[in-house]
C-alpha cells in the first residue's frame, strides 16, 4: 500500500508598505496554502470532536436528549463546512515595523471565504 505525502505550500513574500506621509517599510510574510488533503483532515478532526462531544454527553441525564441527536446531525455539516472553508484558504503571519512610529506589530490572519453552495 502506497502512502502519499501531504504537499505543504509555504512561501515567504515581501511587501512594501507606504504610509500617508510617504514613509516606507518592508513586511516579510509567511503564507501557508491549504491543499485538499489537509483541508479534509482538518474537517475530519473537527467532525470527530463534534461526534465525541455527543458521545460524552450520553451519560448526562436530560441533556443527552438534545445533545446527542444534535451532535449526530452536526457531524457531517461540520465536516463539510470546515473542509470547504480550508480548501481554498491562505493563512498568513508576519511582523512589521510601523513606518510612522517604528513600533513592531504582529500580522496574523487568513484569506478564507465561507463556502457557497
Image (tube, rainbow, N blue to C red):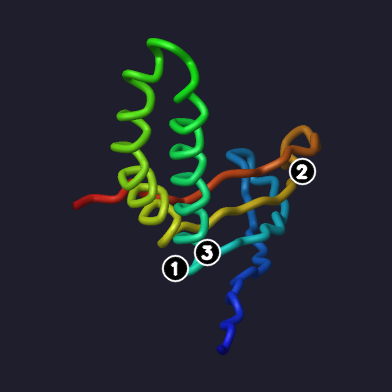
User: Which residue is rendered at x = 72% and y = 51% of the image?
Assistant: 25
Q: Position of residue 14 (x, y in %)?
A: 67, 63
Circle 2/circle 3 CB separation < 8 Å = no
Viewer-nearest residue: 71 or 116: 71
- Considering only order in the chain, which callout, 1 or 2, is on the residue closer to the N terminus? 1
Q: Position of residue 107 (x, y in %)?
A: 66, 43
Q: Nearer the viewer, residue 94 or 57?
A: 57
Q: Residue at x 63, y 51 (%)?
A: 17
Q: Is residue 104 left or right of residue 21?
A: right
Name the residue located 65 percent from the left edge and 66 percent from the top edge: 13
In the rendered structure, find residue 97 and report the number of the disc placed on it: 2
- Residue at horizontal 51%, vertical 40%? 49
Nearest to the observer: residue 72 or residue 89 = 72
The foreground one among 91 and 71 is: 71
In the structure shown, which secondary structural element does the residue marked by tag 2 occupy? strand
Task: Report, in whole angstroms, how far the alpha carbon at label 2 lies from the one at label 3.
Answer: 32 Å
Q: Are marks 3 and 1 in contact (CB under 8 Å)?
A: yes
Quadrant in the rendering for residue 97:
top right
Residue under pointer 1? 36
Amino acid at each position: 500500500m502506497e502512502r502519499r505525502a501531504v504537499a505543504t505550500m509555504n512561501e515567504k513574500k515581501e511587501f512594501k508598505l507606504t504610509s500617508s506621509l510617504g514613509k516606507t517599510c518592508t513586511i516579510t510574510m509567511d503564507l501557508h496554502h491549504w491543499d485538499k488533503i489537509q483541508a479534509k483532515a482538518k474537517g475530519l478532526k473537527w467532525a470527530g470532536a463534534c461526534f465525541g462531544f455527543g458521545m460524552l454527553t450520553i451519560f448526562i441525564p436530560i441533556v443527552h436528549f438534545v445533545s446527542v441527536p444534535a451532535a449526530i446531525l452536526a457531524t457531517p455539516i461540520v465536516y463539510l463546512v470546515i473542509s470547504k472553508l480550508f480548501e481554498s484558504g491562505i493563512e498568513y503571519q508576519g511582523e512589521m515595523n510601523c513606518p510612522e512610529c517604528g513600533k513592531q506589530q504582529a500580522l496574523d490572519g487568513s484569506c478564507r471565504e465561507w463556502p457557497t453552495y
